[in-house]
Image (cartoon, coloured by chain):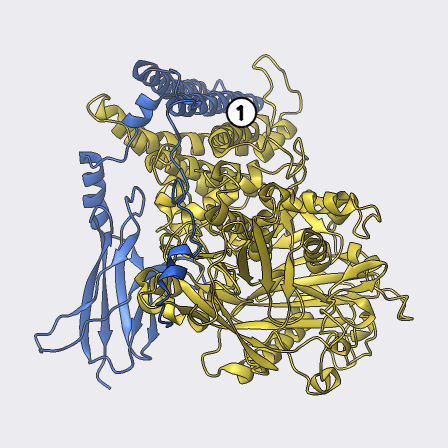
Chain colours: A blue, B yellow
Amino acid sequence: MIDDSDEEFEASRARRPGTARGGPDRQYPAEGSVYASGGATAGDVHDVIAHAVRLGYRVVEENLRHGRDAAERLKANDYGFGDAGADVEIVLHRFLKGARELGSSFFDLFGAVLEDPALREAVRARRTDLEARHSDQSSVGKARTPVQIIGHASASGEAHLGSLAGLSGPPEVMPLKPLSTAPETPPILGARLGAEPHTGAIAVIVPVPEDQPSGTYAGTIHDSASQRLLGSVSVAVPQS
Amino acid sequence: MAGGRESKAAEKPAEVAIVGGGCAGLATAFELSRPAHKGRFQVTVYQQGWRLGGKGASGRGVAGRIEEHGLHIWLGFYENAFRMMREAYAELAAHPLGSAHGHWRDAFLPEPDIGVFAPAGSENRGLWSSCFPPRPGLPGDPDAPSGREMMGSYVAGALAMLRTLLLDTVSVPGDETTIDDWPAALSRLLDKGVLAGAAAIAQALGLIGLSLNSLDPTRHDTRLLTLAESTADALRGWIERRFLADHPDRHLWLVAELVMASLVGAIRHRLFDHPEGLDAIDDWDSRDWLRANGASEAAVRSPFMQGLYDLAMAYEDGDPARPRLAAGTALRGTIRMFFGYRGALFWRMRAGMGDVVFAPLYECLNRRGVQFRFFHRLQEVVLAEGGGHVAALRFDEQARPTAHGDYDPLVMVSGRPCWPASPQWEQLERGEELRAAGLDLESDACAHRADQIKLEVGRDFDFVVLAVGVGAIPQVAGAILDRQPRWRAMTRRVKTVATQAFQLWLNRDLADLGWRFDALIASGGAKPFDTFCDMAHVVPEEGWRDANHEPPATVVYFCGVLADDPSCTGLELERAQQTRVRANALRFLNGSAAVLWPHLSGGGGGGFDWTVTAGGTAEIAGHGFYCRANVNATDRYTLSVPGSTRWRISPLDLDCDNLTVAGDWTACGLNTGCTESAVMSGMLAAHSLSGLPRLEAITGYDHP
């Protein structure tokens, strides 16, 4: 460093001017926003949803009825070979028409939600009985998730991971702690979720040092924002 | 007066030392040298080696062939970069003697096509390509849409696109239509109609379920929500297994899934009015975020996502098994890329980026009075006691121009000013000696110097713009890192990746070699060279005939990431990586080339037949092959890994009161490794010193 003892110079030295702000203004302003001026109400949204669901049921119901009619005719030996094609065709036509209307309704719904700030306020991730039920259900018989060990040649692992839908934050793997009570056994750090390189499937990637003491280690997998439990992982390090 | 310094009178221009002559540094120089400043700033650009450009530099080698760091394509939303270039070209053309660079429309060529390599086993094996129609205007036109306008139009555009996909894929006959040949009708319906209908139901119900699940339970019947969600899940799973798994048009629905997952995620995470905008999801990896918002595994593993990661070089440490791309930055970039382009989606350059961008910029800046000091490599930023400002800059002067004058860096090739691939030794003191020593003055490992120079505040500069690559910061700005925890964190968190590239000049065009698609940019291909482009249009700009060579039919550029090699450093690393890249290229040509170009015959030993390249024999590559390992600290590609963008330093930050930074590694609004980020950063650096340009005038800076 340079000893800056020239006070006169220091007083007159050029300096950067201040700036009005220090970063981007990313927030979409309510004023002037295309979303600011009124749009659908909560009631309209409910109507759109209800209409879409009714439509879906109607499509299914009509096809079921048509199929039931065909079955009755078949039972009564009143069903010719040529009838099958017409029936299938009618079902498909109705299916397609209903699908188009259903899909189009969804976009109407989507647009309505986007156009109203009050609705956007209502559309938020929530912790509900439904979510809790999902968590409970997904904790039973969770699919086994591959574990990829990096480093230790003989270690092996097992993981169970539930659905990653509806996360509030990135998934986080906690340090894998030893199950033994031996003091000063270091945990296994740095585990994370990633992609299994050959299949691209979600895997738990666990770096295990070559000199990791033998034993069984276990850790949990959380939603880092909501702390919702997503799954668990265990690693067995055999004796060398 | 202490130390030879003197107070500078207020009326004298402020001396600005810009260290680094890449896009960011030159953008800063461009802004500060505008006539509107009325000579308020005297700018000097200090550049190591012999040429400007940094990661974008190119040079002319044997027969005037263009040698690049990799494939450089500009995107149609690069508003700030295009505006700068259009102004530079216009200034040059306004000169009474005209300009050898021509009009900017001759230099930048629109490219509407993009392709991604389809996965193995798909019906449309080879390439899924798309032609994006021209959009009104040209990049760099006045009245660029603001971020505020753009978000609304993006959402509307995305929904319109999906509606088109859904409703227009097949026309549904009316109920009254009679069909005589029902097996054929059934077959047609099954081929397209059921796919459309089934996929529509799958998407609609799946997304209704997601959206309904997000509504306020106090306002809606949870039984309805439960029923809708469970029905949707069951039906979606059945349809995906039954209809979508192997259908040849499934790629359309993969795109639909990705777009819908993005929109659902934008609602769920309140991105439309979040104070941080899309930065709010930058801790997520892009694939993880899409997955969490309803995208299927097929969609997040699709060639489209693969292509996105490949184009962004988004592989930590160059490891293809570690794709890492911040979700918000990726979404912002994707939105602007597909919905914010003007003119064409992509813009190719007529010749090398050095020829089309940095040569005109150099000449324009020169005419404005900006000074250039080539062969100056920064060694240290010296802080004053207390650390409040930069007191000195220490440089190695790598070489000195001869007594005849300043160094003239450009050479003429095919009638245009270009950068050579090596210094013009004849203009340097001991030039022949330096040439014979085979020095690479751009190499980190080259410590050669003719002299050491120390610039002092007050005497030689008033302000410093540190526009070197982020990889060089630890070497040159140790004093700042010692004092500023944010700078230390930035150098740890903002990652870079080495890259590799090769170019092949072929005596036959690609159609003749069996390439079945139109010339376009393709990504998502086999590693390590997952991105390639047929660049036949640059061959006429090279000097083949002048060098008594038959011009090749085309030149093809390949590039990709390069894994780090921790086993060595310095010159050993450079040589090892260069050898590795060459070996990678040969392996690629002996393997994947036959897939790309099925009419390519094998060589005598079963390997690649080099006779198809300019100057090649059956077993030896001639001047038709060039490869490069970009491992120098200032050549490494800037990444946007999850969790990193919050650690970027902004040019507006005031850590030292006479210092700012510029580069695509800074917090510049776009936060990706690209030319547009670099130019935006340079504009911010200029603003930090002068108050201009206004931040609102930097297109995209305030984009959500």
Residue A139 shown left or right of residue B189 in the figure: left
Position in image of residue B544 (x %, y %): 86, 66
Amino acid type of disc 1?
Ala
Q: Residue furthest top?
A: B176
Task: Decide: is B605 above or below B670.
Answer: below
Task: Decide: is B503 above or below B693.
Answer: below
Position in image of residue B546 (x %, y %): 90, 67
Q: Split into 4 quadrants, where in the image is the C terminus of chain A?
A: bottom left
Q: Secondary structure at mark 1?
A: helix
Q: Is residue B126 visible?
A: no
Residue B50 shown left or right of residue A138 in the figure: right
Foreground of the two, B557 or B676: B676
Tell me the residue at 67%/54% (across/down): B369
Tell me the residue at 41%/41% (across/down): A24
* Chain containing mark 1: A
Task: Decide: is B673 above or below B50.
Answer: above
Residue B192 shown left or right of residue A150 in the figure: right
**Residue hosting label 1:** A84
